[in-house]
Image (cartoon, rainbow, N blue to C red):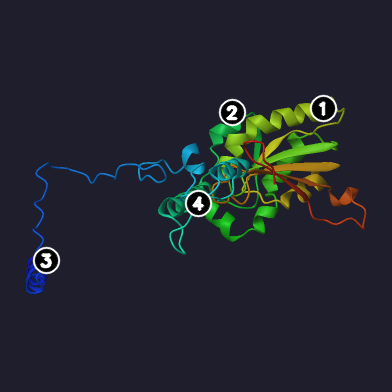
Amino acid sequence: MDQKQIEEIVRSVMASMGQDVPQPVAPSTQEGAKPQCAAPTVTESCALDLGSAEAKAWIGVENPHRADVLTELRRSTAARVCTGRAGPRPRTQALLRFLADHSRSKDTVLKEVPEEWVKAQGLLEVRSEISDKNLYLTRPDMGRRLSPEAIDALKSQCVMNPDVQVVVSDGLSTDAITANYEEILPPLLAGLKQAGLNVGTPFFVRYGRVKIEDQIGEILGAKVVILLVGERPGWGSRKAFPATRSIPRAWRPPSRPTEPVFQTFIRGGRRQ
């Protein structure tokens, strides 16, 4: 049964019920015509860029009792608040933004930090035992250990026994590294040196995991290792930039926990 036969049956049934029979819509005479979005409204628009600041500030609660309170709440947090609902379901724009943020987060996990970018920053590049992104995602244990070539490079090209060793790694979020590097690493190094600390040679670890800082500290004899790593991109926070601090085992009292200390930096001054 083709589309024409189905339309004939529908018209026949509607005529027998005494209802107006809809007329078939003539196809557009303009070649390449594309469907147009409905006109934007005050609260929701299909033409809105879901990654824009306007989309993030969007308030989907209809007829609020105190609109000023919702506006202030929306400005105070990056969380998904004031999005409203359609019955028990999220509104269309809220759902689409959620899916768009999820897609961007997946993209940054799969992207690579360009070698040209590492060279432009003047960083020595080494890598873990991982050889490619797929292996990095499936074998986190190998991302916690340096390759033999990396160990030799650190011993021959880095300052030994520093007070603080700063390391940069791509982790799970390439965008976090490339977007925040210039605002964090140079001021951090300057502050450490101004405090009179002996700072080691900063370098970049490709396919590194957080625990790799323990091995780095033991190889270089660093008192403290600071790892700036792109890690765990969330929905809409793929540029969040965690910093972890670890005291190598050689310097750590037996009673001290071995877990590193985390601090996450987010653009706009918010920290987690």
Q: Which residue is mark 1?
A: 193
Judging depth in this view, the residue of 196 and 32 nearest the camera is 32
Q: In the rendered structure, are the residues bearing label 3 and label 1 in contact, judged by CB atoms less than 8 Å apart?
A: no
Residue 40: tell me if it is visible.
Answer: yes
Mark 1: few, some, or many residues within 10 Å (few <14, many ≥20)? few
Q: Secondary structure at mark 4?
A: loop
The amino acid pointed to by label 4 is: Thr
Residue under numbered circle 4? 83
Q: Amino acid at mark 2?
A: Ala
- Left or right of residue 110: residue 35: left
Q: Amino acid at mark 3?
A: Gln
| 4 or 1: mark nearer the eye | 4
Of residues 106 and 92, the one drawn nearer to the viewer in this rendering: 92
Q: Say which residue label 2 marks.
A: 120
> Picture coordinates of residue 210 (x, y %)?
70, 51
**Element type where label 1 sits in the image:** helix
At horizontal 77% and vertical 40% (from top left) the residue drawn is 155
Report x, y in % for residue 78. 59, 45
* Residue 125 x %, y %: 64, 38
Q: Nearer the viewer, mark 3 or mark 1?
A: 3
Separation of marks 3 and 1 at Cα, in angstroms: 76 Å
**Direction from residue 100 to residue 271 in the image, left or right:** right
Task: Tell me which numbered mark, 4 or 2, is placed earlier along the sequence.
Answer: 4
Instruction: Report the Cα–Cα distance between label 4 and label 2.
Output: 42 Å
